[in-house]
Image (cartoon, grey):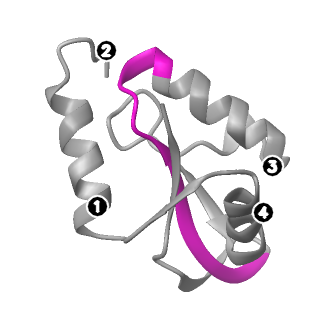
Amino acid sequence: MTVYVDDMQRPAIVGPVDGVWSHLLSDLPGEAGRRELLAFAERLGIEARWIQNPGTATEHFDVTEPTRQRALALGAAPIRYGRAVAAITRAKRESPTRRV
């Protein structure tokens, strides 16, 4: 389906990285969503081990602003942080095919 990148753009220091952070996520539930998200992350050069909340409806990658811009250039759909992300998470939780 679609990989999304939100516009949270929250300044934070994560480990050694001082940046502005957003989220990269899939709208597919379960394994299909994980495969889609991991494949897109690989195209961005993001390591699979950096996934957040693996195996849940809130599975995502945190991305810095330069990576967010590359994700958009590669076709990720821009969404608003908050209600749009919550709607995707809710749909994944309610999906009859979910395995999260």
In the displayed structure image, the side of residue 85 where residue 5 appears, left or right:
right
Number of residues whose C-alpha sits closer than 10 Å to that of mark 1, classed few (under 14), some (14–19) or many (20 or more): few
Instruction: Estimate the spatial distance between the alpha carbons at disc 2 and disc 4, rounded to whole Å.
Output: 30 Å
- Classify 10 Å Cα crowding around label 2: few (below 14), some (14-19), many (20 and above): some
| Residue identifier under label 2 | 99
Give the labeled residue for mark 4. Answer: 70
Which amino acid does the dot numbered 2 rest on?
Arg
Residue at 59% x, 83% y is 12
Q: CA distance from mark 3 to mark 1?
A: 23 Å
Q: Earlier in the sequence, mark 2 or mark 3?
A: 3
Amino acid carrying label 3: it is Leu
Residue under circle 3?
44
Residue drawn at x 28%, y 70% is: 82
Residue type pointed to by label 1: Ala
Q: Earlier in the sequence, mark 1 or mark 4?
A: 4
Where disc 3 sits, the SS reads: helix
Where's residue 86, x and y in %? 24, 56
Q: Do tag 2 and tag 4 residues touch (Cβ < 8 Å)? A: no
The image quarter in which residue 95 lies:
top left
List x then y, in percent, for residue 75: 67, 51
Q: Which one is closest to the eye, mark 2 or mark 1? A: 1
Instruction: Name the residue tied to disc 1.
Output: 84
